[in-house]
Amino acid sequence: MARVTLKTIAEHVGVSRMTVSNAFSRPDQLSEDLRARILSAADELGYAGPDPAARALARGRTGVIGMVLTNSPRDAFTDDVAVGFVRAVAGSLADAGYSLVLLHSSRDAGVDPARDIAMDGAIVYSCAPAMSAYSALRERRLPIVNVEGSPLPGVPDIGIDNSSGAYQAAKHLVELGHTRIAIVVAALDADNRPSSEISLDTASPTISRRLHGWMRALDEAGIIPSLVGTPRVAIDAILQERIDRMLDDPPTAVLAFSDLAALEVMERARDRGIRVPEQLSVVGFDDNPLAARVSPALTTVRQDIDAKGEAAVQALLTLLRDEEAGSPPLLPTALVVRASTAPPRA
Amino acid sequence: MARVTLKTIAEHVGVSRMTVSNAFSRPDQLSEDLRARILSAADELGYAGPDPAARALARGRTGVIGMVLTNSPRDAFTDDVAVGFVRAVAGSLADAGYSLVLLHSSRDAGVDPARDIAMDGAIVYSCAPAMSAYSALRERRLPIVNVEGSPLPGVPDIGIDNSSGAYQAAKHLVELGHTRIAIVVAALDADNRPSSEISLDTASPTISRRLHGWMRALDEAGIIPSLVGTPRVAIDAILQERIDRMLDDPPTAVLAFSDLAALEVMERARDRGIRVPEQLSVVGFDDNPLAARVSPALTTVRQDIDAKGEAAVQALLTLLRDEEAGSPPLLPTALVVRASTAPPRA
DNA sequence: CTGAAAGCGCTTACAG
DNA sequence: CTGAAAGCGCTTACAG
């Protein structure tokens, strides 16, 4: 049995293909009675509706929006903040009738989703401008929105105020009286070295901005922190080992690039009998739902991930309407003081 | 400036459109030299490669696989297990050169992704067979794989052994000597009633199987548990309130449908000064990464979510190759005893 | 309210 | 190694 198409239905009912098309896509273009006859014939013949691929070509619209994540989906989905962002974006997109496709960066088999997947636009999340997916999207002249990335000419940027949040976090430690402070980051290769001795350049725009905020507050207080980091973008064995080394001669306070990293520090401190916050203050970033749950509850910097997702989708929808979309102001961040920070012991 | 297509390049170079097509899609079909000329002309003219929508129509293949989640992406992504599954599937799919599109169930604006998005196949996760997305996919005769769902004729099923895992969990409590046991679930409306008094029918196949396992072990011991549940599929205010009510006159042990629900019970118990495990034993399900982290560490049932994702993708790839794909055996589950369970106090 | 024409941009056999 | 023909299944103006 050949495939059932508009044509099959048209011949069956005795009308033209395009009347059948109208029956599905523009109900107001034909009489109710004729439409009912067409629909019931379609049903009878097992026709599920116009073929989406053909429709996409003819209409020039797919209903799909792509999302480029820093790494493979496997890595990205171990990061709670990234997951929260995907969730918010998928939700807002669904409200607008779009579906979200996850674009991996292929190094693998000849396929490059950013180049080969049919879509109407894309959201690029926390990516270095050099990423190949990025250039593929730009070459296709697809509408794109940049989230927590480095600014690119002509591309709307969405992001939180990382720098100000980090500044508040570091300032909080300074005000508590800490002077021996370590900073724990990813995407930066640093094994317990003073910040004055190593380059603060990192491939991650987000971490770069947080570093900037922390350093500004510490600079103001004349404090030179030590840096603990891993070249990878996520918490890995290298970082864990370096955190351990840091705890051999612990600072009195730690600024971590994420709540997950902060928890990592807290757990390792606990294993060694270093008490938080009495002996070690720890500040996270993100306000992961976990942060309020652990004990001691984590002092951290809150960001509104739902708002970020919504803002990214709104900017993209504006672009899809062929309107200009500027970059909205940075979304606010706020220090949330809980129980993991205290003055250093005398 | 008109859009740049194969034709533009062909005219520019002075070859036919299909030679240009070959340059991109079948490099072995033309001389290296000609191909280089074509590619550089394309580059110069700003041609990003064959249009994916047109290609999809001509090839009958999109490179996209859909995923239907129980609810809106917003709900699904609050569930760690679902997120882990999406992660595993997206990863395995990427390895095979496919991208994952998240399909929401529209009740909203006329679009129904399961009907309207171009894709090569779909994975249906933990859905009731009645879901509209389901029937849309079937009508389109798309290859589909069913995960943690109710069996459907002709559709491969992937799932873990929920029933056996739950049996082990309940058996563990029985062996510790518990007789006053409560079961906490979602997707089942039950406000602290004995299991003998209410129907165990639930819309969730997963919870239904877990219930079956728990009840079997308890039946064997002659124990009638009380049931605490909410009609919604996720933890909500109703469930929290009913858990609170349960703790007014607490059992000595709780079987929870997920680790998150177990944590909910533990937190509420702590708030009231009910000690876990001394006064209340708690068993979760899933072995969420959190489970080992909380204190006391949670006794739970482990499932291998990565294996589940990989199995689903393998089954779908088999179908896409036009081969028969049967349902593999249920993936194993195993009780992991940690610190949240103990014998009841004398 | 209905239909004939042109086109969306590519690929798949098939010839030469 | 290269190209002319047919087709993928639909939709968009435009006439009538």
Image (cartoon, coloured by chain):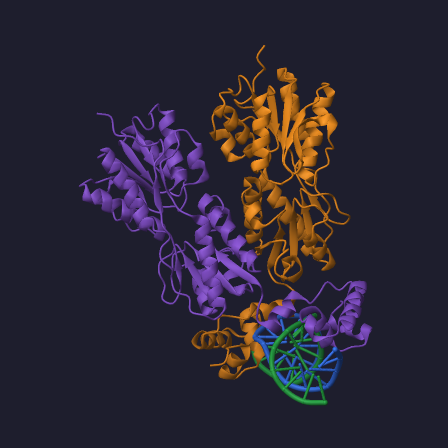
Chain colours: A orange, B purple, C green, D blue
In this view, the residue in front, A128 or B106, is A128
Is residue B328 toward the left or the right of residue D9 in the image?
A: left
- Which residue ends up furthest to the left in the rendered image? B222
Q: Residue B218 location in percent, x, y?
A: 22, 42
Q: Give the vertical position of B267 relative to A145 (above or below).
A: above
**Residue A316 can be seen in this image:** yes
Residue A171 in the image, given as x and y percentages of width and height: 66, 22
- Judged left or right of residue B183, residue A104 is right
Residue B164 position (above or below residue A250): below
Q: Is residue B130 something one can see in this rendering?
A: no
Tell me if B149 is positioned left or right of C12 in this view: left
Is residue B233 toward the left or the right of residue A138 in the image?
left
Q: Position of residue A99 (x, y in %)?
A: 56, 56
Above or below, comparing residue A344 to residue A191 in the picture: above
Q: How many marks?
A: 0
User: Dividing the image into 4 quarters, which one contains the C terminus of chain A?
Assistant: top right
Question: Who's the residue at 32% across and 28% down the image?
Answer: B277
The quarter of the picture where residue B7 lies is bottom right
Task: Give coordinates of residue A104: x percent, y percent.
Answer: 61, 53
Q: Of A41 and A304, which appears nearest the observer?
A: A304
User: Could you say which quadrant of the image residue B343 lies in?
Assistant: top left
Look at the picture and state if B22 lies above or below A214: below
Q: Residue at x 51, y 27 (%)?
A: A268
